[in-house]
Amino acid sequence: MSDAWNALKAHAWLLGLLGFFVLFLIYVLFYAIGGSTWTTATPNLCVVHNDCYCENAPTRMSTGLVNQPGNTWSGLGPVVLGMIILGVLSYARPTGDNPMSRPTFYSWMYAALVVFLGPGSMAFHGSMTAIGGWLDQFSMSLFVTFVLLYDIFRFTKWDLLANGKTYFIIAFVIINVVLGVPLLIGNYTDMGMFGTLAFGIPAGVAILLQLIIGGVTVFSNGSVWGVRRGKSSPGGQEWWWLVAAFLSFMIGFGIWLFSNTGGPLCDPNSGLQGHVFWHILAMGFTPFFLFFFLRSERRT
């Protein structure tokens, strides 16, 4: 059994692929249980308000397996990039004590959460249901809170504590239970502000922290709180990963903003939706580039 497990770990991307297919089968199962229609489920509030990211501009639930094909299948972007991260980890040569440089609890969890961004998004755009919307937002919440906690634990060196991993898991679970409830409420009621705040606040803090860490370490000869970025000097090659992550997020967000329902770039019947670029750039390449940035960290 141990030999089989070690062989599987050596090809970690297979675990990501297996996990994705399990989630997708669950999605199909819910569709089948619903009587081959999503109309029996509680519709997402975007359906009620006719504001569902442009594609098909649905005002009612579809009887098909997928409501928004373009927006749904583009969710495969994070899945593919997450499995590439798993592939990189499978053949990585450890560098120092950085957990992201080799297969560890932290690196595997990071890659798994990137993969999960895909099914979460697909559940929403495919079903247009309230529960689908919750899975979409919750998958993003899981990823954002992981990055936030990972930065905190690495820079405070709490991950070096004897029970550091246990503390991380406890904090991660508690935070996401606290955030998951208002996200759920926001998807089933018109009090959508709950969901916006539950995701927006930790996301904003995580982005701000990443930028602060980047700026402070650059202006302090690459070292702050015992952590160094870059191989040699401030602004080394590794910093471009953070720049690339930020640009991919902003470009994806900009396209999404102008191609949303009623926006100047919105064409409900187009085969190429603007929201597709949000999935590929902001939900796919942003965490992909961020992974390589995190791998560049070296403790002093």
Image: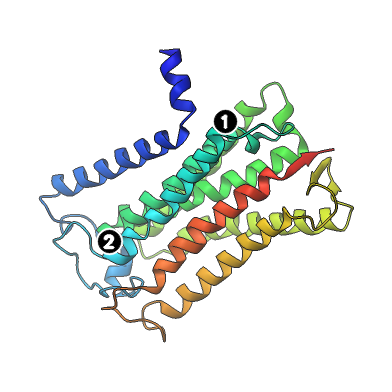
The residue sitting at 46% across, 66% down in the picture is 278
Instruction: Evaluate whether residue 99 shows in this view.
Output: yes
Q: Between disc 1 and disc 2, whose residue precedes?
A: 1
Q: Is residue 290 left or right of residue 157?
A: left
| Residue extending farthest bottom | 264
Can you give x and y, in whole percent of width and height, for residue 22 in the image? 30, 38
* Residue at the image point whose x is 26% and y is 64% from the top: 69
Q: Position of residue 230 (x, y in %)?
A: 78, 49
Could you tell me which quadrant the C terminus lies in?
Answer: top right
Quarter of the image for residue 204 reads: bottom right
Q: Could you tell me which quadrant the N terminus lies in?
A: top left
Q: Describe the element under mark 2 as helix, strand or loop.
A: loop
Q: Residues within 10 Å of mark 2 (few under 14, many from 20)?
A: many
Q: Which mark is residue 105?
A: 1
Q: Percent from the top left, x then y, of residue 130?
A: 31, 57
Element carrying mark 1: helix
Q: Residues within 10 Å of mark 1 (few under 14, many from 20)?
A: few
The disc placed on residue 128 is 2
Do we see residue 184 in this rendering? no
Q: Residue at x 76, y 56 (%)?
A: 214
Question: Is mark 1 in CB contact (under 8 Å) with mark 2?
Answer: no
Marking on residue 136: none
Q: Position of residue 2 (x, y in %)?
A: 45, 13
Q: Looking at the picture, tell me which residue is in the foreground, 17 or 162.
A: 17
Q: Looking at the picture, does residue 95 appear above or below residue 200?
A: above
Say which amino acid is labelled 1: Phe
At a point 63% along the width and 63% down the height, the residue shown is 246
Q: Is residue 13 above or below residue 138?
A: above
The amino acid type, in three-letter code, at marker 2 is Met
